[in-house]
Image (tube, grey):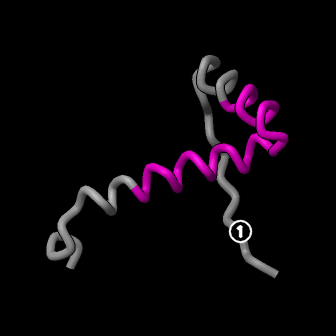
Amino acid sequence: MKSHAKMLCRLPPEVKDFIERQSDKFGSSMNSEVVRSIRERMDRMEKEMPASAGE
């Protein structure tokens, strides 16, 4: 079983509404939409950072 860290996160109302709409649209949980969004950002940041900068 995977281990997951818990985190309390306070969101502005419009961000919560967006996450809620996305989860309804894709039939997923709000949590999975938050994780998906963060992972997309992580991927973008890795592509922008030169390989030598992270070492």
Which quadrant: the N terminus? Answer: bottom right
Identity of the residue drawn at 18% across and 66% down? 50
Magenta-span inclusion, residue 24: yes
Identity of the residue drawn at 67% across and 65% down? 5
Query: Main SS type for the magenta part?
Result: helix
State the residue in front, 14 or 40: 40
State the residue in front, 5 or 19: 19
Name the residue beneath numbered marker 1: 4
Residue 22 pos. (x, y %): 71, 32
Q: Quadrant of residue 43?
A: bottom left
Identity of the residue drawn at 81% across and 44% down? 29
For disc 1, the neighbor class at 10 Å (few under 14, some 14 to 19, many from 20) is few
Residue 35 pos. (x, y %): 63, 52
Q: How many marks?
A: 1
Which secondary structure, mark 1? loop
| Residue furthest out toward the top | 14
State the residue in front, 48 or 11: 48
Which quadrant: the C terminus? Answer: bottom left
Compared to residue 50, the image places residue 2 above or below, namely below
The amino acid marked with disc number 1 is His
Identity of the residue drawn at 23% across and 72% down? 54
Q: Which residues are magenta?
A: 19-43
Compared to residue 25, the image places residue 41 above or below, namely below
Magenta-span inclusion, residue 39: yes
Residue 13 pos. (x, y %): 64, 18
| Residue furthest out toward the front | 26
Residue 39 pos. (x, y %): 52, 56
55 sits to left or right of 28? left
